[in-house]
Image (cartoon, rainbow, N blue to C red):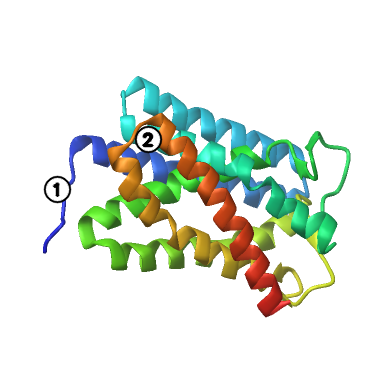
Amino acid sequence: MNTAVPLTPLDRQRWQLVLGTMALGMALILLAARFHLGWKVAALSALLINALLLWHALARKDALFLKLFVFGLVAGIAELPSDWFSVSVKGVLSYPGGEPMVWTSPLYMPAGYSVLLVQFGWVGWRTLHRFGLAKSVLITGVAGGAMVPVYEYLAHSANYWTYQNTAMLFNTVPYYIPAGEFVFMAAVPFMLRKLDRGGLGTATVLGVLEGAIMFVAWWASFQLLQ
């Protein structure tokens, strides 16, 4: 059965926004990595890109992106136990200090995951309606998992955070991080089927569920790949 949905003018604006904010985020982390600028650039990037995404959702009256924004922000808050697992339970993740924190995470961290899940939420939504569930799961999972090693490598040079005492690629990126990212990104298209039919309350519940999937994905990946 063909589930393809034609590309509308709003869809083109969504692609421009997502690709543009991805480029902006990459430019900022490259700058931070080149000059070792630290957490202030990470916070600026998360806040600026979230502002752009929310502005689009409100100004364009884009109900899908508003639901994705709520989903991503709630999931970002629900991700905090995953950071606690890496920082306090396993002791493999460290932040440089001197920055505002919430529990064991930098204050900007939920906003950072919000950006990620809105951007890849759109990729998942479009591929879900263009290619169907199976291909969307594969595309979203692979795209999310493949992006992580690049970002994590740059984050180390940017002095955002560091890893230690675990098996790592290039002595910088733990194997369990992209593996876990693949799993929880692959779960996004399943969430989108519910998000399509629900409202902001549904987006909130799905965000909590996505945060729980993050924890399980990284816990299981750590046990297998440490």
* Residue 84, percent from left and from top: 77, 52
- Classify 10 Å Cα crowding around label 1: few (below 14), some (14-19), many (20 and above): few
Between residues 80 and 179, which one lies in front from this camera angle? 80
Numbered circle sitting on residue 145: none
- Identify which residue is drawn at 45% across, 68% down: 142
Residue that numbered label 2 is attached to: 65
Q: Residue furthest right?
A: 98
User: What separation in Å lies between label 1 and label 2 (alpha carbons)?
Assistant: 18 Å
* Residue 135, percent from left and from top: 30, 67
91 in relation to 47, above or below: below
Q: Residue furthest top?
A: 59
- Identify which residue is drawn at 43% across, 37% down: 203
- The quadrant of the picture occupied by the C terminus is bottom right
Q: Classify mark 1: helix, strand or loop.
A: loop
Residue that numbered label 1 is attached to: 6
* Residue 39, percent from left and from top: 76, 42
Between residues 76 and 147, which one lies in front from this camera angle? 76
Q: Kindly tell me whether residue 149 is visible in this rendering.
A: no
* Residue 92, percent from left and from top: 81, 64
Look at discs 1 and 2 and give the one toward the viewer: 2
